Amino acid sequence: MAADRVLPLSGVHNFRDYGGYGVEGGGQLRSGVLWRSAQHEAATDDDLAALDALGLETVVDLRGDDERELHPCRRSDRFAARVLFAGGITAGLAPHLQAAGGAIDVETARARMIDTYAAMPYRPALVATLRLYLSALAEYDAPSLVHCVAGKDRTGFAVAIVHRLLGVHEDDLMHDYLLTNTAGKIEERIAQGAAHIRQRYGGEIKDDAVRALMSVNPAYLDAALATVRRDHGDIAGYAEAVLNVTPEMREAMVDKLVV
């Protein structure tokens, strides 16, 4: 059940388990070891206690250096996970903010999000962090978390790559991506994003355009995957050529994460 995937935190949006899906050839992803979320700047003390209880060993931060500096994640005194990031600017802005430049309507908002996603597979700093992410999944048999700002765009692309490498069907891959539109306090998250967008770009951006920027849409992820398939045939080919995933790494990921 989709609701069972969501960890209902007060100050961290879109925190959920992306394991548990069936995989091609039989078996399913382990539950309780693959987590995704938005950033943790506003995490409450209770949120931090809930995160500690997950036993996270690795946290992969897909945000750029500027985003980490402006919005540092809160950590408890007990936090002991390794935080992985390559450094640099992964998006210039979070994709939903990058797409929002200038006063726009809903059609333009969607078109800009599609263009933003289409370029995502080759952002140098993001690629470098994705390499660390996949390497960690192949090496460590312990719970991990991947996050960006809103936990929907860069995180959505990263999780789609992992899902496909592990054999999750593309229908389930898309289902998990679209859970952003219903997971947790969706209206609060959209309102928060709207405030940031309007502060930066002006109040003339209409509500439906803001919602298009702060939600996910199948066409967005499809645009990123179309780039991958155009250049590499499939996600496995992209992962090998761009993300340095060897057949041995992929086998190790399957051994650790599929039951």
Image (spheres, rainbow, N blue to C red):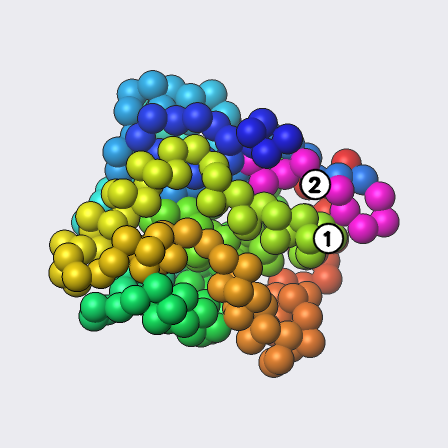
Whether residues under marks 2 and 1 lie with C-beta atoms below 8 angstroms apart, the answer is yes
**Which disc is residue 92 wearing?**
none
Kindly indicate the quadrant of the structure image that contains residue 107.
bottom left
Quadrant where the image shows the N terminus: top right
Secondary structure beneath label 2: loop
Residue beneath disc 2: 21
In-image side of 124 versus 254 (left or right): left
How many marks the image carries: the answer is 2
Q: Amino acid at mark 2?
A: Tyr
Foreground pick, 237 / 132: 237
Foreground pick, 83 / 153: 153
Q: Which residues are magenta?
A: 17-26
Asked if the stretch drawn in magenta spans residue 22, the answer is yes
In-image side of 194 versus 233 (left or right): left
Q: Residue at 22% across / 56% down in the picture?
A: 197
Residue beneath disc 1: 169
Can residue 196 be seen at all in this image of the molecule?
yes
Asked if the stretch drawn in magenta spans residue 44, the answer is no
Percent x, y for residue 21? 70, 41
Foreground pick, 222 / 47: 222
